[in-house]
Image (cartoon, coloured by chain):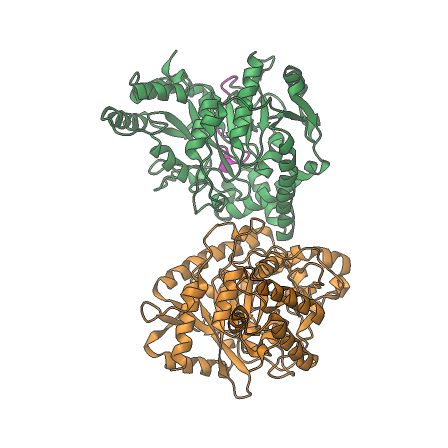
Chain colours: A green, B orange
Amino acid sequence: MLLNDLSATQAGDKIRKGEITSEKLVQACIERIDQIDGEIEAWAYFNADYALEQARKLDLIRQAGEPIGPLHGIPIGVKDIIDTAHVPTELGTPIHSGRVPFKDAWVVSRLRQAGAVIMGKTVTTELATYSPGKTKNPHDPNRTPGGSSSGSAAAVASNMVPIALGSQTNGSIIRPAAFCGVFGFKPSFGMIPRTGVLRQSTPLDQLGVFARSTDDVAMLTQVLAGYDEVDSATTFLRATPQLLSIAIEDPPLPPKIGFVKTPIWDRADKICKDAHEELCETLGENVEEIVLSPSFGHVLDHHKIIMESDLAYSFAHDYETTKEMLSDSLRSQIERGMGYSAVAYHRALQQQAIMDDILAELFQEYDALITPSAIGEAPIGQDNTGDPSFCTIWTFCGVPTLNIPVFLGENGMPIGTQMVGAKNDDARLLRTANWLLRKLNE
Amino acid sequence: MLLNDLSATQAGDKIRKGEITSEKLVQACIERIDQIDGEIEAWAYFNADYALEQARKLDLIRQAGEPIGPLHGIPIGVKDIIDTAHVPTELGTPIHSGRVPFKDAWVVSRLRQAGAVIMGKTVTTELATYSPGKTKNPHDPNRTPGGSSSGSAAAVASNMVPIALGSQTNGSIIRPAAFCGVFGFKPSFGMIPRTGVLRQSTPLDQLGVFARSTDDVAMLTQVLAGYDEVDSATTFLRATPQLLSIAIEDPPLPPKIGFVKTPIWDRADKICKDAHEELCETLGENVEEIVLSPSFGHVLDHHKIIMESDLAYSFAHDYETTKEMLSDSLRSQIERGMGYSAVAYHRALQQQAIMDDILAELFQEYDALITPSAIGEAPIGQDNTGDPSFCTIWTFCGVPTLNIPVFLGENGMPIGTQMVGAKNDDARLLRTANWLLRKLNE
């Protein structure tokens, strides 16, 4: 096994034990990037020397017997809307070409404290919206990797790094994770502070992670969870959830899982529908179908009002000064966003609380829901990043959601199932996901 | 001295010591109401039996030696937009005539826990906006008491009750307190939970108190301060401020007070300007004039966008179903409110944070600011409740603000000065106010 094929947890163990160095690990990842990134193009910024320099310093720290963090020496990809001090963060648009922040985002500070090696910046779509970046799907370069966290998903899927950061305002973590066949996790709204990350929409923006194992998902999320007084979404102080230790526990009782078609089931491809029927058969008595209240059918409209209004607010300066450098699709979104009234916005926002309450009740009975991550496999072509609509309800409600790469379609393309948990009970969701993975391997 | 002339603190002492009963105190207040409320009309709902029944129960509790609360046996007026279980709460509009909530507002529960006697519901303007209720100014029935907490201010000013609750979204506590010549205190935004109170505007609505002494202000506010998970403004948990004990302390150093004319100084009457010049002379070296950044001049516009948008959102049902029962002025506000875009709303809201930061810096140097509470004395006539604009900046920024009834104009009408403190340092503001009152009495 090549070092770049190890998970973060596996590689971290070896580094702690002195079996490998961070430099060796990072070198293996660099070789993998040199080998295939010409085709995949997962990176917006990559500089082997920058990565190696961090790795060597971290190796010296370990060799000196100083305390090391949970990600000591592990390379990570960071989505290019997340600020990195003195390293370009160009937000996926020529408008901000050459932009170099002088300060790390909150999450990047956390990564450095934990000992991670910032490997580089991964490609995002235009301002993390729908217009694609250059990245190709590692399973088929003629297909989209999904977006907006395109580079993070592709880099993890092709073993260029074991883990990466992404963000989701609609379907920007779960969808690319599904299309690229990796785990993608968007924790509960407010769990990871967003300070220093491009703002699209304060009530919708959520950070998350990509990995090739649930252990890595749990470990990385636990590192990133925290309180930051600058981000009002995190101002409700709470203990850091013990994701890693709880995720590997056996559930106290066999979990009860709800299979949810959602009101947009018609949009799903046959391959996706069939895969989920098969999954339900395998899970047998542990799963039952749930029909969501029809009010969830309106969530896509509510989400659109909030997101587009907020795009118009957040990107007002870019729109006013360099409108012609925006894609047609984003320009249209912004222009629609300018047209919504404050009253319509608040009505949509009110639905968040209402839907929240309905889901909270559901999760008193069910440990998790399963539902498709996307309408099917990654579509052919690079003109769009695929339909995010199977993610919208869960993003809107701020519940934790995990893409599990369980299926391979007939074209060898991955198809994901999405596992959704109760808000602020991310640990239970990961524990149930591990149970499900064991069940599928029986 | 008649019992109804006592402050809440004084009366509470006597009740604790067994020198008077709550029934006697409430009876004295009832007699006062019978005597003058025919002219003043401070009450939207008043039922002597309802008040006496509570008083007698509270007397039995004391006589039985059971624990008693800080407001044990003290009558209080409650603005008629604050829900009281099984007692009408009609919101100052015929649309909601006969409305009887089945649950107490959070603050009313707190009052009952503290042993208060809910004396009745005090008159509010229409839905707590600008169209006047029936209440007259106790100093001159030809003048407005101010609004929207008209009845609370008038009832306290005319010794019908020692204390009352009010609310402020623009100038609805400070202005009537100034016009009626009592203390009115609007604590920091988020200090008092608003659950069960008519919502006008989530980012602006703030609860507060009326009293005839700063001791009563401190005691009552301390009872009401708290955390309620339903009101997101209070979700930042913190210790209950020890207002009463700190307010009576001597300041560690002579306080430094900033006199602020604000960008709307031109609106102030000569009588108000003269009074403040005199006040500054009396305070001598403890005060210096501060010129606010010109950006504060735009706050009135920002405030208007937020308030009117939120009126349109909050009162949408009343508008859609019974538009003809709304006053012309409120209907116009709602219709303007429907026209603001979500982007304009968020831009205005962003200014709250910016202004907050500027004020926070100012309060590193100054213990408090003084500025007029209103443009002058209560205007003649009952067609409006007076200009709230001297309150707008402080409401917008959510800083604590206190009307101090220090002047009497040539017509015998009170004129207030407004003392403003640092956000979440309400105790320091009250301590400085007590210092100022002592200084004026030297």
Answer with the quarter of the image where residue A355 lies.
top right
> Which quarter of the image is occupied by the N terminus of chain A?
top left
Residue B367 vs B271, above or below: the answer is above
Q: Position of residue B273 (x, y in %)?
A: 46, 80
Q: Position of residue A296 (x, y in %)?
A: 68, 36
Spot the residue most to the bottom: B410
**Res. A143 in view:** no
> Which of these two is toward me, B40 or A317?
B40
Residue A55 vs A278, above or below: the answer is below
Tell me which residue sits at (47%, 56%) in the image: B240
Left or right relative to A72: residue B407:
right
> Which quarter of the image is occupied by the C terminus of chain A?
top right
> Which of these two is toward me, B147 or B265?
B147
> Which of these two is toward me, B39 or B386?
B39
Left or right relative to B186: residue A287:
right
Q: Is residue A133 magenta?
A: yes
**Res. B272 in view:** yes
Q: Is residue B378 magenta?
A: no
Left or right relative to B62: residue B290:
left
Residues drawn in magenta: A124-140
How many marks do you count on the picture?
A: 0
Q: Position of residue B262 (x, y in %)?
A: 45, 71
Q: Position of residue B22 (x, y in %)?
A: 60, 70
